[in-house]
Image (tube, helix red, strand yellow):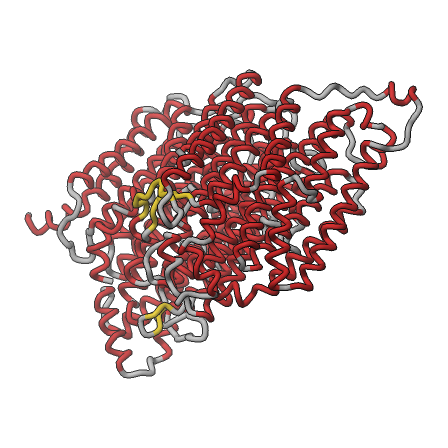
Amino acid sequence: MLVWTIYISFLGAAGLVLLPRENRRAARILALLTALAGLALALGGAAQYELRATSDTRLDLVNLPWITDLGINYHLAADGISVTLVLLTGIAAVAGVLFSWNVERRTREFFALYFALIGAVYGVFLSFDLFLLFVFYEIAIVPKYFLIAVWGSTRREYGAMKLALYSFAGSALVLVGLIAAYVVSGAQSFDLLVLAKQSFPVAFQHWAFPLVFVGFAVLAGLWPFHTWAPTGHVAAPTAASMLLAGVVMKLGAYGALRVAMLLFPEGVHYWQNWIALLAVIGIVYGGTVALVQRDLKFVIGYSSVSHMGFVLLGLMTLTQIGLSGAVLQMFSHGIIAGLLFAVVGRMIYDRAHTRQLSELEPMNLGVLAPFAAVTFVIAGAASMGLPGFSGFIAELQVLTGAWGVFPRLTILAGVGILVGIAFMVRVWIKTFFGEKQTTAQAAAIHIEPISIPERVGACLLLGTTVLIGLWPGLLLNLITPTLGSPLFQPLWQGGRP
Amino acid sequence: MNASLDWVLPLIPEEIVIVSALAALLVDFALVRREAPAARAAAVGGTACLGCVAAMIWIALRPGGPEAGMLSLSPLTQLLKVVLLGMMLVVAVLSFGARFTRHIGEYFALLLIATAGLMLLISSENLLVIFLALEMLSLPVYVLTAFNKSSAASAEAALKYFLFGSVAAAFTLFGISLLYGLTGGLELGTLAGTIAEKLKTPPLEPVYYVALVMTLAGFAFKVAAAPFHFWAPDVYEGAPAPVACFIASASKVGGFFVFARILMEGFAPFHGSAGWKAFAAGWMPVLAVLAVLSIVIGNVAALVQTRVKRLLAYSAIAHAGYALMAFFGNSRQMLPALGFYVITYALTVLGAFAVVATVENGGGRDKLTDWAGLGRRAPLLSACMFVFMLSLAGVPPLAGFFGKFYLFTAALGGTTRSGVPDLGMLWLVVAAVVASAVSFYYYLQVLKQIYTVEPTEDCQPLCQSWAALLSIALLAGLVIAFGCVPGLLLGKLPLVLKAAIIRF
């Protein structure tokens, strides 16, 4: 069932291309149906996974020979981490469609590219053949470029090209590492399960690991390769920035975990401290820069860099609790960042036509758009990591895991959380609770009411983060057993026997 | 009588093509001279197409054949001939709508003669015949480049092409004459034997290196590898678009194949090594320099181009560099990797140039900014261009991606130390991968114009001939199919390569 999440998205994209150009309503409905079908399949697939996963917590979906000359298989499978992220993608896709209900220009093309991206993302999360994973990873780049370049706002062509070039440069590094691993292993296979059993020479791991890890982590916003993220997010249309922050950044983190860390466990141990340092710099730097931004969307963009730092820090702890926190943080940040971008891009910018904090301040949006204000405050609270929301559990786990390994960095990361609270409070005050203004000015600003699709989308995302915040076991039951599976053993032991 | 038939039979496809060239001239001269240009082009072009199809059918019916003196007819050469004839067909179809010449009969006849030269080129085993076939290919192409008599650029391009080409040919001839003097033979087999003998008692006389480099220069020119690439941008830009199609695709395939044949057969024992810290004299280091120069120069120069044809020309230089990387693979992977890459590249670039030709026939120009909003004016054509550009950039699941992937894998796995892969060619692969990440910029520039920039003034649908559109769509389909299921082509290659590999 999980496999069909990929196919249904690509089919939806193809169907959208074939629709008549002027029929925007049909395009929207088909898009919503495709996204809902994807989410339903993801939920059904999760249930199926719970029932049918083998003892090593993996559910094989398809495994067919594809390119026999190089030992490449069409191998799709799922473990708990894949299922978690597929669920995230399903939810983010539905929310993204709901928040792009007002796209009037080239609607069908917009949604076609949107689903090409979603299909590729599902594909990455479900690929267990590294060639296949790479193929999906690259397919995801092209729609991103066009979504931003055609439908974007501030400096859209620059942002789109920067994002595309950073992505391609990252995947170039990954490609070199993958081919080198294939050649060195001599196993004549790109299958993750086969390659993860090979013991690569330690000297090889020492240079191959950073190559592949950094290649993927470019997309996860690893400092100092994060600069695409704020510009890309700001330039993107609402749905695209939701997807960028919501799932695309997770592609990077997922690839870093799935490929770089599982293939080169000794390499991870060798570079652990350095990458953790970069991650913590990202946390503090992202938060600090967000504190002084004038554009509301840049604040959220930099906050993404900061929050993704926790994911990378969690990965580098190399403890089960740290990794499970990292995966949970991927999910949690996907939901929360999606919501924040939705409020900023759709609810505020599309109505007030500005994102400058200084211009928003006198508008008194807290009164004019109460729904937006409430949503944004709750989303902000979730983003700060307050208890009761998913971010709290995730960051707590990451910090617990990190405390035992690098205590000094953990304290710095804790400071990063404080900065996170500070910039969010600043934005709350400036955007929604500015100084009172004269009624004449208030009457001059017309804010159209928040539409139904927006309300539904906001409730979906808010509900998810609260649900996971109150009942983290839903996802932890998927993640924790997977981290204990044989595939992950070399990672804990620092190498293969 | 029998003795003469032995000579005639293996060459029948080439003869069919030559005869159809004469027929094209005759049809034009005797039957349709007074008709309207469009009707003339259809009649003469139809004759040319018929000839190509007849030759293809003949090859399909008689795949293999006896060795015929200086020619070899392996399943591989036959497959390549079919591919070349197919490309020639597309070029002919594109020429139907061309308005650049009144000499329609001569135009098609020259195209066909060049094709026959290509077919001879890939089946010859003898340096002298290779040289003759090369000239038979080159001379008509020089003339064809100049065929747009109303354009100064066309004449300039032809002159440049001719001057560079004849100097390169002179170098090659000089190299061949040295080799003949040194080894006493012109057959590739005897050449390899003599060199192997000489290598047993090193050092090799320096004159062998001279002969090697001289011979290679001519072929590096033909495939437009840097630093022998200076003709390419001007010729691609100045030549009439269908001619540029031919030069960029069919002539490239032939050039690479004969390049591979000379190196892997004639100079087989004299390969040396270009591995990191394992440098050894031979043709590998020469090729490594050519490859890395082509990749860097091609990709960097393409970044600043403002015309689609020049952009494609520099991208072609870069792609020649990638293709040269196949030569560092081991014997099992080298030929399939090269074959897959060159064939799919030629299909892609043929498609891209066909799009350029169609846009020009429809009244557009090849300045990048003139392509603004093409996505609105010609949706299907633009979709095909989208496929071609992304395939050239190497985006999966298109053929260009797998071609590059296979090349890089082959090159990286080619060097071993005591049986274990030592990643000696990593430096070249890294250079190539980094450069190909850079290359996305300029391919995206083209797509950006087509899809994201709004058209300036007239948003009329572009007028396109259905035949051209059909063949372009077919090419795009092939690029997608070979990318998604490389086995379609790769599955065939090993079979036909088996015979060839035994020799190499």
Q: Position of residue B181 (x, y in %)?
A: 28, 73
Q: Position of residue B147 (x, y in %)?
A: 45, 39
Rendered image quadrant of residue A371: top right
Q: From where the camera sits, is residue B240 visible?
A: no
Q: Residue at x 31, y 83 (%)?
A: B202
> Against B172, is A232 above or below?
above
Q: Is residue A114 left or right of residue B3?
A: right
Note whether A495 is above or below B113 in the view shown: below
Query: Could you say which quadrant of the image residue B465 lies in?
Result: top left
Name the foreground residue: A345 vs B202.
Answer: A345
| Residue ID at (55%, 32%) | A93
Taking B204 as reference, is B413 above or below it?
A: above
Describe residue A367's horizontal placement relative to residue A57 as left or right.
Answer: right
Which residue lies at the image location 47% right of the left edge and 43% below the top edge?
A82
Location of the C terminus of chain A (image quadrant): bottom left
Q: In the rendered view, would you say A393 is above or below B200?
A: above
